[in-house]
Image (spheres, rainbow, N blue to C red):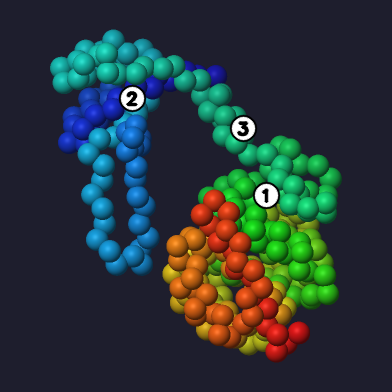
Amino acid sequence: MSAWLSVSIELDRELVPLFTAGVLKHGAGGVEEQPADGETLRLTQPWEKASREAAPARCRVTAWVDPDVREALQATLSNDFNLSDLDFREAIEEDWEDMWKQHHHRIPISDTLTISPPWEAQPGDLIIPPGNAFGIGDHPTTRACLEAIDELTEGLSTCLDVGCGSGILALAAARNGLSAEGIDTDPISVRAAEENASTNSLTVRFSTNTLSHFKTPRDLIVANLFAEVLSEMAPELIRLTGQHLVLAGIMESKASSLMEIISPHLTLVSANTTDGWTCLRYRNDTKI
């Protein structure tokens, strides 16, 4: 078990290079930047055409160094900063290894479906290790899709998870007895989904295929993606919807524009919003 010393300070953005140079001189591998108290950081997506907002004028930066260099680091930083503004704290590496686990727990979706991290898994749980691929069941968009899968799968045979990420939606469908597939443009997500399928002893085919690869409709289509991406995919999603289409990942402010695209072709069953995220359920009445 080893200890580290963290040092952080809230400062004007123009002073970040000065702080960074000081901590790098004493062995820090880099700095972490977060918005200062009272500041918000608006994240933009690649497809947004509006000009990007300027970064906040103030921020909080943190670096980690060996505790033995504290006095030397203080001497260096005191040339440019008030020592009273610097926050020094000891961090134990062993704590870091387990601290993140405190934020991930079992998530009951229904009487028959519970999502669980490996360290809390009980018999029958769908085990999804938190990782880089989005989707462990704790976000409102993922949960809305899981609830839809759990409610809709009776009488259905096939499911396609579009933008599968960790594979959680396709795996939940497979757990409910459907023949499920998942696609994602990111090969890393596909590999993570395949590993999760193996962990749960489920047979699901994951790939980087595009929607155009599929020629026949699936009973259930689920897509947990941003509204802009769903809008581009809409013609293919409509074409492949055999019975039910579930869309999530949609900011409430953008739900109406997506509905204008899809509603003329499929029957809107519900539009439910939780914490600013909307989930749309559609039905293909011509196939049911």
Q: How crowded is mark 3: few (under 14 residues within 10 Å), some or many (20 or more)?
A: few
Against 279, residue 62 (above or below) is above
Q: Are marks 3 and 1 in contact (CB under 8 Å)?
A: no
Q: Residue 102 bears which disc, if any?
A: 3
- Check disc 2 and give the amino acid type: Ser
Circle 1: element type = loop
Residue that extends furthest to the left in the rendered view of this protein: 79
CA distance separating discs 3 and 1: 15 Å
Residue at (64% x, 51% y) in the render: 137
Q: Where residue 105 sits: x, y (%)? A: 68, 39
Q: Relative to residue 87, is residue 159 drawn left or right?
A: right
Residue at (27% x, 13% y) in the render: 84
Against 37, residue 277 (above or below) is below
Residues 89 and 202: in front is 89
Location of mark 1 (residue): 128
Residues 239 and 97: in front is 239
Q: Are marks 2 and 3 in contact (CB under 8 Å)?
A: no
Q: Do the residues labelled 1 and 2 touch (CB within 8 Å)?
A: no
- Check disc 1 and give the amino acid type: Ile
Of label 2 and label 3, which has the lower sequence position?
Answer: 2
- Check disc 3 and give the amino acid type: Gln
Residue that extends furthest to the top in the rendered view of this protein: 71
Q: Where residue 92 sits: x, y (%)? A: 51, 20
Of label 3 and label 1, which has the lower sequence position?
Answer: 3
Residue at (72% x, 56% y) in the render: 198
Q: Where residue 80 sits: x, y (%)? A: 16, 21
Q: Residue 220 bears which disc, if any?
A: none
Circle 3: element type = helix
CA distance separating discs 1 and 2: 34 Å
